[in-house]
Amino acid sequence: MNRIYTKTGDQGTTQLASGQRVYKDDAQVEAVGAIDELNAHIGLLMAGLDDDALLPRLHQVQTMLFNIGGNQPVDDQLTQELEQDMDRMSASLAPIRDFIYPGGCRTAAQCHVCRTVCRRAERRFVSLSKERPIDASKLRFLNRLSDYFFVLARKLNFVCNVTEKTW
């Protein structure tokens, strides 16, 4: 039988990939947990999309998030590709003159959830960077990824013919 539970965390600790046991509120565990939550929200976004053309990029993002969570190196190429995607999407959107309320069509609203969870993950990694070195490419990726979800939300609302509400 292959059990998912080990009971080793019942006292509030978990084991890092290095084998070290730390409390579950350790800065590294918090950062990786925020990445995991973001990845789950992206999965929900993907499940609701009508445009299959977006799925390969979002799958790449999920893979990169697993790499970040697993403390693997991050290649800036995907960050640059996200910038190019944002430029392409923004070309058909009205300029931003006011703050935009999160919402609109269901998938755009889910993009806003992804954006805010991504910002939290970024903050957790900034906190972690005060304790131990963090590869700057990880912070760049998370920063750009939250921007990507903002632009994608705007694009999805545009495609769904939903007028953005502004403040």
Image (spheres, rainbow, N blue to C red):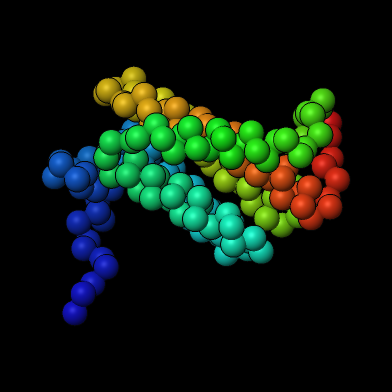
Q: Is residue 46 left or right of residue 153?
A: left
Instruction: Find residue 116 and report its horizontal and vertical position in percent.
Output: 59, 39
Residue at image location 28% in from the left, 36% down from the top: 73
Q: Is residue 38 above or below residue 47?
A: above
Instruction: Find residue 159 and report its horizontal and vertical position in percent.
Output: 77, 52
Which is more toward the observer, 123 or 13? 123
The N terminus sits in image quarter: bottom left
Residue at image location 81% in from the left, 34% down from the top: 94
Instruction: Find residue 135 and report its horizontal and vertical position in percent.
Output: 31, 26
Which is more toward the observer, 77 or 103? 77
The reply to whether residue 50 is in sight is yes
Residue 48 image-quadrant placement: bottom right
Q: Is residue 136 above or below residue 155?
A: above
The reply to whether residue 24 is in sight is no
Residue at image location 57% in from the left, 35% down from the top: 84
Q: Is residue 150 left or right of residue 165?
A: left
